[in-house]
Amino acid sequence: MSIAKADPSSEQGPKPEDILQQMERVLASGEFHSPERGRKFFRFVVTETLEGRSQFLKAFTIANEIFGRQSSFDAQNDPVVRIEAGRIRRGLERYYLVAGQSDEIVITIPKGGYVPHFEYAAGYRAADQSEHGPERIDLLPSGDGRLGRKLSRTTLTIGATILIAVAGLYFTVAPNGFTLHDNQANLPASDSSRPIVIVDMFQSGDPGGSASDIAQGLRDEVIGQLAAFGDIVVVADPSKANDGSAKAYSLQGGVQRDGDRLRSILRLVRRSDAAVVWANNYDADLRIRSIVQIQADVGQEIAIAVARPYGALFLSDTDKTARSAATKEAGADDCTSAYYSYRRAMDLRSHTAARDCLQRATQRSPANATSWALLSLIYLDEMRFRYKLGTAPTARATELAAFAAERATSIAPNNTRALQASMLVSFFKNDIDKALKTGAAAYAQNSNDTEVAGEYGLRLAMSGKWQSGCELISRALNNGAGPKGYYEVGMALCAYMRGDLQAAELWSRMCDLEYNPMHRLVLLSILGAEGKTAEAAQQKDWLGINAADMMKNIRREVSLRLHRVEDQERFLGGLQAMGIAIEPAGRDTISSN
């Protein structure tokens, strides 16, 4: 039986009044996880479509109506509307998998646009099409699929979470979605080397009471948020966990309620020695936020703190694992740890160790997208951080980075690390449109990945999209992304470009000034613009001694990073104020690298 399309003007689809009732049902459900502006977005696109104005549902219109963006809003490069639409799609998918399984009308917002579609659920037909009224037919997996064909990667995440809670299954990220495992022992070798997070049952002080329900809802939210990170294995049935795994961790939690006050208590425990490697409390006021919103917000904070790059899960034994990466038998996970250890140290020795390990890993496991992506980033660093690492500036490094990024995305098009690598390669090859498009895709894939958010924010900002880019950089910095001092230089440039020189100097002095000449150059430009000649002269002398080659190619280095001419000239103006000679414009700055 085919699904009736829900054109409001068509007699074959749901009636407008029924669609409005369904919209309100969705909005009233605790399973529709969306902040207030997301709910406003959803209501707006539904009502506008029913009023016959769907042709006006463009990113620009929505940005103005919902987000208060001005007429200067650039829909192509500012991802705010796309990101919110993605969240609404995920909220709808969760709703129909949990609370809305028996609903007659399905509302979706297909990817590629913002116009909602209204249709009868698979297995339903309109009352006037059957003398017995609406008929329900089994809608779960069948030959023609119908609803099944619509299941996106996020839907599979949520569906997997539900199945896990019921059947004690395991799931890991595969190139095209999530793979379920009925037993930890059955995990593929490539997955069994990943850190394993076993989510214990969350406790409360009143079994069967409101706090117990909140604790269970928070646990479900945490599982769903953790599932978006492809570098870990999530286990939702503690009874099926293998205590012998050296990479297994228990995520333990509890909820306490005192009137309108709610406290969530979490800790991450390494199962091999019972060491607590991370713990935190989260307090909330039920008079300010709903239970559903608190669960969503706290679940996001927990997932970021535990599973993000440089998060608790990876830092607990990164250095130990990184040492084993030097052996020829090191696995892909050891090489991943070696990469993050290198990013913390940012020196040539750790860079070489991580690069060699990843080269061996891609030879042994050529279908491992993450290894290819990290290898791409390692190669690219030989060019973009060459003054810090002391590597030779060759075009070969960029070519190898591009090749590895292409391999990663061909294996797993939705892998966030692969998309991050592809974004950076495109940016430094001066293909800005492709870089920003790929960055938006990476961020939409997992907005909780603070490394992706920060790198995408830097590319937006340095491409001239300072407002949206700086917001993402700030968020990444607040969540502890990147090595120390890395995103601080981004914040310094954000302040510099908006004319706040005092803030720019403060941020710049928080950067890795001792070892990174590019960060010194930023501070020198800011001091020159401020007219602080004595302090600027100290930075100029240091750079003349420690980065003489860079000082001979300043325009090339600046244009490699700042792609708008006006931004380049503002930056170079601060240097020229200190009497620094700048080579003439017009040189081929990209191909020389």
Image (cartoon, rainbow, N blue to C red):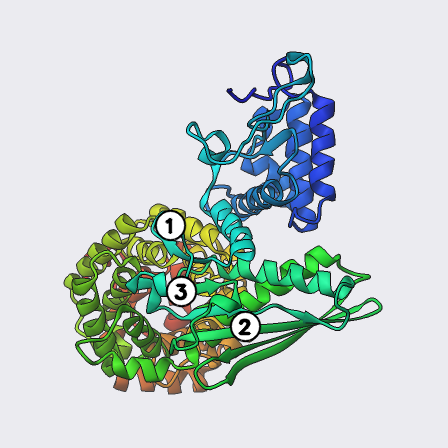
State the residue lying farthest toward the right: 259
Observer-side mark, 3 or 2, equals 3
Q: Which residue is mark 1?
A: 414
Look at the picture and state if 23 lies above or below 172: above
Q: Indicate the amino acid at tag 3.
A: Gln
Q: Gap between marks 3 and 2, in whole Å? A: 17 Å
Q: Residues within 10 Å of mark 2 (few under 14, many from 20)?
A: many
Residue 213 at x, y = what percent?
72, 60
Q: Gap between marks 3 and 1, in whole Å? A: 25 Å
Q: Indicate the amino acid at tag 1.
A: Asn
Please indicate, yes or no, whether residue 250 appears anywhere in the rendered image.
yes
Mark 3 or mark 1: name the one nearer the start of the chain: 3
Residue at image location 25% in from the left, 71% down from the top: 331
Q: Which residue is mark 3?
A: 184
Q: Are marks 1 and 2 in contact (CB under 8 Å)?
A: no
- The quadrant holding residue 341 is bottom left
The numbered disc on residue 293 is none
Observer-side mark, 1 or 2, equals 2
> Is label 3 in a helix, a strand or a loop?
helix
> Is label 2 in a helix, a strand or a loop?
strand
Q: Indicate the amino acid at tag 2.
A: Leu
Q: Which residue is mark 2?
A: 251
